[in-house]
Image (spheres, helix red, strand yellow):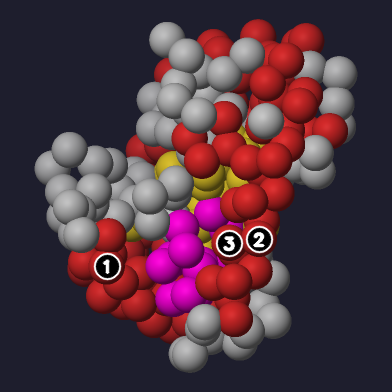
Amino acid sequence: MIADKFHEVEAKIKESMQRRTRVPKDAPVTLIAVTKNHDVAAMREAIDAGAVEVGENRIQEAKEKYETLDRPVTWHLIGHLQTNKAKVAVKLFDLIHSVDTVHLAKAIDKEAGKIGKVQDILVQVNLAKEESKSGVYKEDLQEMLDLVDTLPNIRLCGLMCIAPNYENVEDCRPLFREMYGIYQKVKEIPYKTANIKYLSMGMTHDYPIAVEEGANMVRVGTAIFGPRQY
């Protein structure tokens, strides 16, 4: 069941890539299987079907799974990270998507330095300026990116955003299109240490549109695993 759903999502991503008009059709997309609130058995089923990237929202849940999951995967933190959890986060995650403040970036840098790690991160952008969501506003983004580029134990790898949960999913398209434009401009900046290569946008309800508009990472949970188990 999970394997079938995983392959369905993969197929939809390929279909969406072929509908691209402004983005190269062959530019690859990384599918992150969002495993929050799903048990290790479900994770193993998805991994055995081909998932190699998993996304978690909560540090404690991720830590428990990390210690019991006997599969080699890349771990993504896609949920909001509190600064006091940075120490654990840098030990668990390969890529942190949700860096949204200078304060948090400095905390990650400090903790990564303690264990001799350069932590890959994305800066989360709140393009729609939703009060309920974290993220840097567009007008503050450049200052944030410049600061991150000075931190020795962080490597800026791109941007992440979450679209509003519009009733009509097509309403996401202008936001994704604008986000791709911002990403393209950021890629052109000659940073010292950054390696801008990821644009993480799109979830279960809107990932086909995100892919059409230039996402090269999508975070999909419900379409693979079904409703969350609470």
Of marks 2 and 1, the one in the foreground = 2
Question: How far across and how far down the image is residue 171, in percent?
Answer: 21, 66
Q: CA distance from mark 1 to mark 3?
A: 16 Å
Name the residue carrying label 1: 170
Q: Amino acid at mark 1?
A: Glu
The picture quadrant where one finds residue 103 is top left
Name the residue carrying label 2: 11
Q: Nearer the viewer, residue 103 or 205?
A: 205
Segment colored magenta = 207-218
> Number of labelled discs?
3
Q: Nearer the viewer, residue 4 or 183?
A: 4
First in sequence: mark 1 or mark 3? 3
Q: Amino acid at mark 2?
A: Ala
Q: CA distance from mark 2 to mark 1?
A: 20 Å
Q: Which quarter of the rendering shows the C terminus?
A: top left
Task: Indicate the secondary structure of the residue bearing disc 3.
Answer: helix
Q: Amino acid at mark 3?
A: Lys
Question: How far across and how far down the image is residue 192, in percent?
Answer: 62, 70
Question: How far across and how far down the image is residue 113, in percent?
Answer: 67, 35
Residue 152 visible? The answer is no
Q: Which quarter of the rendering shows the N terminus?
A: top right
Position of 66 relative to 101 (above/below): above
Residue 209 visible? The answer is yes
Which residue is drawn at the image coordinates 58% and 61% (left, top)?
A: 12
The picture quadrant where one finds residue 32 is top right
Label 2: few (<14), some or many (≥20) within 10 Å? few
Residue 215 in magenta stretch: yes
Q: Are marks 3 and 2 in contact (CB under 8 Å)?
A: yes
Name the residue carrying label 3: 12
Q: CA distance from mark 3 to mark 2?
A: 4 Å
Which residue is drawn at the image coordinates 66% and 78% (left, top)?
A: 27
